[in-house]
Amino acid sequence: GSGVLSLLCARLGAGHVTAVAPSRMLWRMARQVLDANPEHGAKVRLLEAPAAQCFVEGEERPPAGEPEEGGGGLLGERADVLVVGWFGPSLLGRGVLPALDHAARRLLYPGAQVVPASATVKGVLLGLSVHDVSGFDLSFLNQYRWHPGSEAADLDYELSQRGHRRMSEPFDVLTIDLQERADAVSAMEGLGAAEAPTWEHQGRVAVATTEEGDWNAVGTWHVLQMDDACELSSWGGEAGGSAPHGSLRKQGIQYVDPTRVAGGDEVALEVWQDTLQVLLARAGHAPRPRHSQVPRWHFDMVLDAERNDKYEEAVKNAIEVKKAFGTKEVMCLDVGAGSGLLSMLAARAGADRVVAAEMNPHMCDVGEETVVMNGFAAKILMLQRDARRMLTTRKPDGTAPDMERKADILIYEVFDSGLIGEGALHLVHHARQHLLTEEATLVPAAATVFCQPISLRKEAVAGFDVQATNRWRWRPDYEGVDLTAEGFVPLASPQEAFQFDFYDHETNLKPGESRLSIPIEADGVFNAVAFWFELQLDEDTTLSTSPYGEKGRTWQQAVQLVEEVHVSAGDTLGLVALHDTYGISFIVDDASIDRVQRRTGQPLWDPTWKFVYDQVNRMNGKVKEACANNPLALRRMSQAAVAFATRPGDFGLDPDHA
């Protein structure tokens, strides 16, 4: 990883430290951090190889028949202490146990100390169900909430959602004694692989429920026993505290079929553990086969009361105005309808007809079921369509129209963290040309984008200089970031970057540019532009994604990284804001600041990583082209993607990336 644990070992007195980086890019990042801390970094020997490909120089390699991949790395001698830091949200998904087993056989002295000595997987029963939302029953969404393994999640965040709750006290799932395992494997030196114990565990845990309700998930985290007096937990919520920050702040969620329980009931969980995962299931129950899911962000969206209430207010006002001006039958078009919530809000507010368009076939199924079960089947028509290809006239190939007439109101919520990344401008343009009446009302009507120069970087961890890690965060466009949880430093006041009047749809389809001169108000290192938006739903109703006010969970802010430069209070920073109708970006105006003199010395990206990134991008382009032109290729890629997601460890993949 970052090399920090290796530096800590050196600072604490280790005579020599060997660090193993499993990939080329992790090796480069660790090398950069070690070089930035020469006092202790000089004691660290860094190997670029997975642990399973490392051996001690001069010792016998694996016997015939025992697997050995690649060339690997060589240690000068065996080690007295093994420090394991390669834990993820699911504990084992990154291959900790295979690496430990290999180290015990090939890299450690007998009796070597393992840190941490043991790891305990903890659990808590959860009720993560959606029920009443804005007066509608959305419980049909719950059957689409699942994951093939352990889903990385923030339990504090999930439990803060309306209707989500704990349904048991914390309990132990299983404990893996890493020290005992290493000692046992070390003693097996010379045995063949067939004689080695499997170390797999299958058991049952009885858990008492504390509340009545629908139990449908188990939250998991782990506690690392560092030594007899020190432990480290990946979640603070089990004791009423807060979760730690950094690599341990994520926990896991495993879903089960919903079960109605009463307080004081006892439920039994089956526990399976192999070298790559810990799986939980309801004992004595065959889980229902799954073929699709609703992503977690959609649950965040439908539970966002502010979003729902403000959209309802604006839609209701639009319908009332249409009827007041003599429209006999008000027809709404809801684009990106998803679960059908906004369509039902329109129908309840008095719309006579609603056409709900949703591209995703599974979400369309969810929306149709929700609409029917809430009694709106006569008013709302769910269509699995890309609204940009819909027409109200017969199509050139003779296909019937998608809509019987043009709509009076367009309702759309197809905005990403950067506002236009999901194609909102193109969608509105097509709707205005083909799907809406001349006097149609748009909800929302307009949007304003604000931007702000910020510092979003790491400088020091445990007293070590880790500024070199900042270059590894780069991506070519913006990323969605919850700035309230990131510890960013604002360097100037927010400025308006763009205004979009959605009624002026033809102008919006022309790429735009806005030049800004921003007075810097604080000293610091400028390395990112944060931006967010305010939706003007109607004349009186706005919805903001600003990090400086109360907002719901639907959107994060957008952040674009730029080359690091020192700035001082009193400087004027020139920024050029650009949009190409599908995304917003920012360029630093070199005329406003001498970047050569102000650079921190940290590049925007690592050059080797950037070269590989560009190669992978070109390869991905060919894969996309093949999938678009060949259904069989798409099927093979889909099957591979499912395999990667369900068993990432089998393919040597990081579960977070898979």
Image: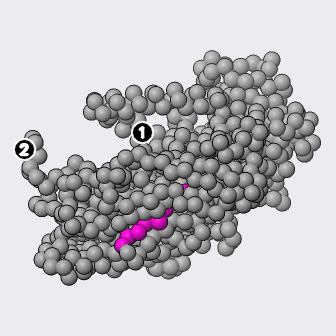
Q: Which residue is mark 1?
A: 641
Judge whether residue 536 is colored magenta: yes
Name the side, left or right, on which 129 lies relative to 353: right
Q: Position of residue 113 (x, y in %)?
A: 82, 43
User: Which one is in front in this view, the residue at disc 1 or the one at disc 2?
Assistant: 2
Badge 2 amino acid: Gly
Find the magenta span and give its range: 531-538
Residue placed most toward the observer, 479 or 657? 479
Residue drawn 66% across the image and 33% down it = 606
Locate residue 250: give its quadrant: bottom right
Q: Which residue is mark 2?
A: 398
Q: Position of residue 141 (x, y in %)?
A: 35, 65
Residue placed most toward the observer, 329 or 624? 329
Badge 1 amino acid: Ala
- When the figure is inspected, residue 2 is found, relative to residue 427, above or below; the finding is above
Q: Position of residue 575 (x, y in %)?
A: 59, 49
Q: Residues within 10 Å of mark 2 (few under 14, many from 20)?
A: few
Q: Position of residue 131 (x, y in %)?
A: 38, 74
Residue drawn 51% across the image and 51% down it = 514
Q: Check disc 2 and report its element: helix, strand or loop.
A: loop
Q: Check disc 1 and report its element: helix, strand or loop.
A: helix
Tag of residue 40: none
Q: Considering only order in the chain, which callout, 2 or 1, is on the residue closer to the N terminus? A: 2
